[in-house]
Amino acid sequence: MMNTRKGCMKTMSNKWINLVYEDICHVIPEKDIREHECSEECWCSPLVDEEDGYIVYSHNSLDGREEYEYGRKFN
């Protein structure tokens, strides 16, 4: 994540999108089965954490990609 506090910024990594506005960051799965809302009320019940002065909402994917990334599932 780039270190900025003003405006809205979008950065992309492999399979995830980081949307940053001021001190809030939403980490959203790219091209998920269902569209996500940049809100704590998103249907996926995002995890909320604080990191480097940012409030970070980590959204959960409907396609289960986290399970592979964390090594809980294998191909």
Image (spheres, rainbow, N blue to C red):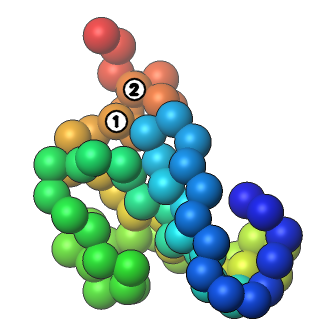
User: Does the residue at mark 1 contact the one at mark 2 (Cβ under 8 Å)?
Assistant: yes
| Residue 61 coordinates in the image, percent (x, y) | 29, 51
Q: Which mark is residue 65?
A: 1
* 54, 72: nearer the viewer: 54
Classify 27 as above or below 56: above
Q: Residue furthest top?
A: 75
Classify 14 as above or below 47: above
| Residue 29 coordinates in the image, percent (x, y) | 38, 51
In the structure shown, which secondary structural element does the residue marked by tag 1 occupy?
helix
Q: Residue furthest left?
A: 34
Few, some or many residues within 10 Å of mark 1 (<14, 14–19, 20+): some
Residue lying at 24% horizontally and 48% vertically, measured from the top left: 32
Few, some or many residues within 10 Å of mark 2 (<14, 14–19, 20+): few
Please, what is the three-letter code of the amino acid marked with disc 1? Arg
Quadrant (top left, top right, bottom left, bottom right) of the N terminus: bottom right
Q: Is residue 45 left or right of residue 62?
A: right
Residue lying at 37% horizontally and 85% vertically, measured from the top left: 39
| Residue 60 coordinates in the image, percent (x, y) | 35, 57
Q: Which mark is residue 68?
A: 2
Q: Which mark is residue 35?
A: none
Please, what is the three-letter code of the amino acid marked with disc 2? Tyr
Q: Is residue 33 left or right of residue 20?
A: left
The answer to whether any part of residue 49 appears in the image is: no
Separation of residues labelled 1 and 2 (CA atoms): 5 Å
